[in-house]
């Protein structure tokens, strides 16, 4: 293939991706190996313990799961009453499930807050400015990219070696083949806005925050990340998503603000969307 035969959007996207990866490598070195990075890591986490009982946590999990199932059931009922394409069906199912989870998380959070207020427990808030939240989210994304690139290469090579299917998620495949602007916008909203918000509230602000002061780090960090990766239902995506979940948990613990992994998650998904639309395979 000659240079003239390469699609210009793909060339631009590839160049930007290389720049992001190189920037991520530099930041990863600075955070992981420089003296200043080691000094920052020695500072105590600003994330305060979540002072709720095990029964309260189980109750919150029940609310979230029940709301997610109810949302998905409502989407199935709607799909059964109208004739829609497979792309629209996936969007509606995603909106139903993610929207249900988000509603359940909101109800659970409000319930837990009221119980804490009644018990005289006040959770302090971080004073990070919005610009710093976005900067921290961007840095989290940049640091994650080279790590995930390496994990993805090792993971897919291992799966190929043992004869496992390494095809992409169905949603990714449909995204790559979507021709309707409405389908692309709907899937982009689901991937870049709704899913990051819901998943970070459930897995990091919920499960990880509860476990981090009640279980060893080797359980608190990987367990929510493993469940997060498994729920995406694709073996080839499990390895990178598992590591992504751990990175998001680290970002949450080091900043004390759930907005940071939410922003990083949304930017990560946006980067993936751009690569797909540019025609780059990954």
Image (tube, rainbow, N blue to C red):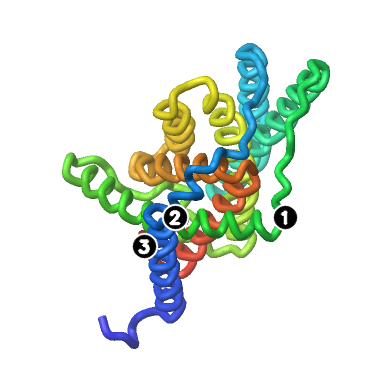
Q: Earlier in the sequence, mark 3 or mark 2?
A: 2
Residue indicated by mark 3? 281
Residue 43 screen position, x and y as percent: 53, 43
SS class, disc 2: helix
> Which residue is rendered at x = 62% and y = 39% of the image?
46
Mark nearer the viewer, 1 or 3: 1
Tell me the distance, in whole angstroms, between the alpha carbons under discs 1 and 2: 21 Å
Residue 76 screen position, x and y as percent: 62, 33
Tell me the quadrant of the picture where the C terminus can be found. bottom left
> Which residue is rendered at x = 42% and y = 26% of the image?
219
Please tell me how many numbered marks the rendered image carries.
3
Front-most of residues 237 and 264: 264
> Which residue is rendered at x = 60% and y = 45% of the image?
255
Front-most of residues 124 and 209: 124
Image: 63 above or below 227: above
SS class, disc 3: loop
Residue indicated by mark 2? 31
Residue located farthest toward the left when viewing the structure as drawn:
161
SS class, disc 1: loop
Image: 144 above or below 161: below
Q: What label sits on residue 28 in the rendered view?
A: none
Residue located farthest toward the top when viewing the structure as drawn:
55
Decide if residue 46 is in sight here. yes
Q: Earlier in the sequence, mark 1 or mark 2?
A: 2
Instruction: Report crowding for label 1: few under 14, some 14 to 19, many 20 or more residues within 10 A (C-alpha).
Output: few
Tell me the quadrant of the picture where the N terminus can be found. bottom left
> Which residue is rendered at x = 75% and y = 27% of the image?
107
Residue 27 screen position, x and y as percent: 44, 61
Instruction: Report crowding for label 3: few under 14, some 14 to 19, many 20 or more residues within 10 A (C-alpha).
Output: few
Residue indicated by mark 1? 129
Query: Pointers 3 and 2 in contact (CB under 8 A)?
Result: no
């Amino acid at each position: 293939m000659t240079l003239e035969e390469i699609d210009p959007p793909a060339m631009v996207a590839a160049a930007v991706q290389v720049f992001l990866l190189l920037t991520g490598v530099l930041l990863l070195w600075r955070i992981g190996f420089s003296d200043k990075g080691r000094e920052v890591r020695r500072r105590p986490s600003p994330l305060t313990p979540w002072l709720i009982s095990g029964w309260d946590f189980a109750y919150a999990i029940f609310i979230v799961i029940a709301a997610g199932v109810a949302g998905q059931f409502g989407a199935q009922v709607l799909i059964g009453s109208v004739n829609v394409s497979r792309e629209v069906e996936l969007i509606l199912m995603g909106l139903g499930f993610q929207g249900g989870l988000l509603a359940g998380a909101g109800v659970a959070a409000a319930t837990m807050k009221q119980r804490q207020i009644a018990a005289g427990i006040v959770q302090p808030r971080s004073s990070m400015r919005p610009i710093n939240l976005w900067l921290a989210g961007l840095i989290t994304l940049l640091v994650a990219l080279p790590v995930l690139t390496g994990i993805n290469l090792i993971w897919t090579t291992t799966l190929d070696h043992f004869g496992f299917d390494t095809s992409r998620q169905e949603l990714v495949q449909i995204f790559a083949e979507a021709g309707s602007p409405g389908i692309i916008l709907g899937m982009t909203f689901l991937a870049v806005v709704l899913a990051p918000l819901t998943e970070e509230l459930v897995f990091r602000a919920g499960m990880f925050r509860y476990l981090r002061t009640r279980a060893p780090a080797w359980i608190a960090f990987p367990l929510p990340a493993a469940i997060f990766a498994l729920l995406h239902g694709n073996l080839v995506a499990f390895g990178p998503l598992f590591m992504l979940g751990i990175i998001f948990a680290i970002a949450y613990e080091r900043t004390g603000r759930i907005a940071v992994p939410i922003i990083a998650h949304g930017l990560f998904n946006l980067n993936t969307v751009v690569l797909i639309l540019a025609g780059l395979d990954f």
